[in-house]
Amino acid sequence: MEQHTPNNVELRFNSALRFIRIREAIKKTGLSKSSIYDLMAQGHFPKTIRLGGRSVAFVEAEVDAWMVERITARNVAA
């Protein structure tokens, strides 16, 4: 599976670009917090962005792209 790093993710900057916190990523994907962090450690889920201090967030477009990849992988395997 493709790794999600700034080098291989093309970001289109527009007014819809936004950061989401872990709770929203959990709600959006249906994964648990520990599953998200396990997938991140394996390079199979987008990494967080440091916002300052101890605050981190995901780029929503990267999480959306990950979800589309999962759907595409399912459809190819079927």
Image (cartoon, helix red, strand yellow):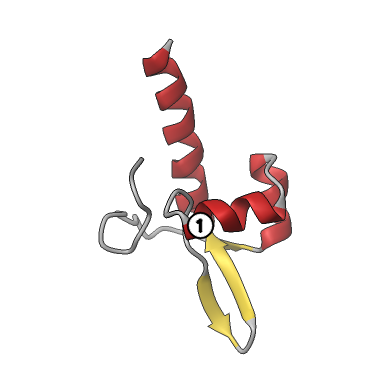
Question: What x and y, as percent, mark residue 57?
Answer: 59, 68
* 70 versus 64 height, above or below: above
Callout 1: few (<14), some (14-19), or many (20+) C-alpha neighbours within 10 Å? some
Farthest residue to the bottom: give it.
53
Is residue 16 in sight in this rendering? no
Above or below 18: residue 45: above
Q: Nearer the viewer, residue 61 or 8?
A: 8
Query: In the rendered structure, which amino acid carries the disc numbered 1?
Result: Met
Q: Quadrant of the N terminus?
A: top left
Disc 1 target residue: 40
Residue at the (59%, 74%) spot, across then down: 56
For this orientation, the residue located farthest to the top is 78
Position of residue 28 relative to residue 15, above or below, is above
Q: What residue is at 64 percent from the left and 49 percent from the top?
A: 35
Residue 40 screen position, x and y as percent? 50, 57
- Compared across the picture, whether 31 is left or right of 65 comes to right
Q: Is residue 46 left or right of residue 1?
A: right
* Secondary element type, mark 1: helix
What residue is shown at x 67% (from left), y 43% (from top)? 31
Q: Nearer the viewer, residue 65 or 74?
A: 74
Q: Position of residue 53 (x, y in %)?
A: 62, 89
Q: Position of residue 66 (x, y in %)?
A: 46, 42
Residue 48 appears anywhere in the view:
yes
Q: Is residue 73 left or right of residue 23?
A: left
Q: Quadrant of the C terminus?
A: top left
Total numbered circles: 1
Which of the two residues, 40 or 11, is positioned nearer the viewer here? 40
